[in-house]
Image (cartoon, coloured by chain):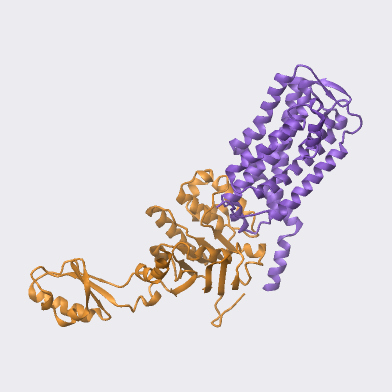
Chain colours: A orange, B purple
Amino acid sequence: MVTSERGTDVVIAVSGLRMSYGPFEAVRGVDLRVERGEVFAFLGPNGAGKTTTVEILEGFRRRTRGEVVVLGEDPELAGPSWRARIGVVLQESDPERDLTVLECLDLFAGYYPSPRDPKEILEMVGLSDRSDAIASRLSGGQRRRLDVGLALVGDPELLFLDEPTTGFDPTARRQAWEMISGLRSLGVTVLLTTHYMDEAERLADRVGVIAEGRIVAEGTPGTIAGRETAAAEILFLLPSHARFEELPDPVRQAFEERDGDRLLLRTQSPIAVLGPLVRWAEALGVDLPDLEVRRPSLEDVYLALTAQDAERRQ
Amino acid sequence: MTSSTSVASRVGDRPATVIRLALHQFPYDLRAFLRNRQSRFFTLALPVLFLVIFSSVFGGGRTKVPGGRIEASVAFVPGIIALGIIAASFVNLVISVTAQRESGVLKRRRATPVPAAALIAGRALTAVVAALVITVVLLGIGWAAYSAHVPARTAPALAVTIILGALTFCCLGYALASVIRNEDAAQPITQAIMLPLYFISGVFVPAGSLPRWLVDIASVFPVRHLAAALLKAYNPYTTGAGFAGWDLLILAAWGLAGLIFAIRTFRWTPQGR
């Protein structure tokens, strides 16, 4: 077991990972550390290298270069006892054919040295009432929950979830999120890939944004890429009889651009701008319709980080 | 920690573990096989249908077999047993293994500690059991409808031939599945290979009534040898224990070649996408 200086378990340690398919370099130097009990989200557009990286960590692909240690072993060389400690939810996989939900779980439980009780897993993924249904007849959301159940039945220390809610309707997505959040209580370390911001924000302790095969930013969902210290944006609609020149100095200094009919201000100290703005409106006896104060969302940060990547693709 | 891990991984691949997991896999594969309508039709219903049709249409006269002549309807039984064995262990296996690989079912199993040998052996066991079941059914129909019967003297030879045949065609099935890239192609490719071989190997048409050169061509391929070995173990004129040594040897050689090719080319992940 690799142990860091602070004495915490490092479950995944990757440095300088590179992967080429012929002349195309899909992964161009990824460094990554995931500690025990963490939920880490890999965020990135399609084709950014997420799935390639995850499949290398899962032992499905050989890498071109770099060091990879997962649960103390190199996934390329690891054997059955290592696979007994991981759980994998693939991006695409059909259920076992012509078996019921419970039979699928029983079958997989038998592969592991010390499995969890399949009935308990059914409960956990919310499929108890579907245990006798043929697995291939489940709805998309139910199939995905069975996938998670199959990945959990061996009682893994580390769970890989590759785009667990792609193609879900909002209700199914919310149910899946609740289930994944519940894994935290089991102490399972989770590596998740997604291209949904809200999913990463809701589930992850830490987020790594990957673009063009590199991790371009890493941090907690709230602080990634300086999100918490970035300038706040203030938006409001100028009352019809007021003119821009009449606005107090701090407001005019923070003015950035017109966003449709609204004025967009950008400032590091929102109170110093909002105070004068509100007092001005009160003195004038007008309301400020559409007033909004916001920090850059995870989506703004993500779009800015991956913009270059997107441009180059077009 | 590191040393105990490497010991555990050695333990994980012990023959005992492989056998235990193959026996764990087997009932699930068998259940899936029996639940699947397509499997049931092509491996259980179709051979019965063939036997009834061929025996009714061409069953009037007597067929020349080594040592004498037997009722034509009776002579079809071993040929159709060969077809049943191949349907259960080759055609059905190629289709299901290709489908499992292309749909990600094998890939998901690959992420678990189960060894490949256990999955392959478990699936092969299902094919052997299916082959035995269809043989018993066909013999039962032959006995009830056409008064065919197997001499007790050659019954062990018949059982050995069936099991060796099923295992051989399993190995060949795994070998062929490796080169088929998508599951839609599996059914037509297996039939395109097998239908002509059935005709020239004494399955649909008694080998005695085929031109010599056609039988010579057929003799290169394993279907002819399975059909011939089954006929020998079944033929009431056969003297001795009924083991067709040469045919069984050639069958085993085909099986071994298939196994070596299959081991070298086996893939867990989808190839068509």
Q: Position of residue A242 (x, y in %)?
A: 9, 72
Q: Is residue A231 left or right of residue A160?
A: left
Which residue is the extreme one toward the top?
B60
Can residue A61 be seen in the rendering of this structure?
yes
Q: Residue at x 57, y 45 (%)?
A: A97
Q: Is residue B183 left or right of residue A196?
A: right
Q: Is residue A263 left or right of residue A2?
A: left
Q: Is residue A121 left or right of residue A167?
A: right
Q: Position of residue A118 (x, y in %)?
A: 57, 53
Can residue A98 be seen in the rendering of this structure?
no
Given residues B100 and B172, the one toward you in this image is B172
The quarter of the displayed image where residue B172 is located:
top right
Given residues A172 and B138, the one toward you in this image is B138
The quarter of the displayed image where residue B191 is located:
top right
Q: Position of residue B118 (x, y in %)?
A: 70, 52
| Quadrant containing the N terminus of chain B in the rendered view | bottom right
Which residue is the extreme one toward the right?
B240
Q: Residue at x 72, y 60 (%)?
A: B13
Given residues A136 and B96, the one toward you in this image is B96
Q: Residue at x 68, y 53 (%)?
A: B266
Which residue is the extreme one toward the front?
B213
Work out whether B139 lies above or below A302.
above
Q: Position of residue B202 (x, y in %)?
A: 77, 30
Given residues A22 and B83, the one toward you in this image is A22
Q: Residue at x 82, y 26 (%)?
A: B208
Work out whether B240 lies above or below A72.
above
Q: How many marks?
A: 0
Work out whether A149 lies above or below A25.
above
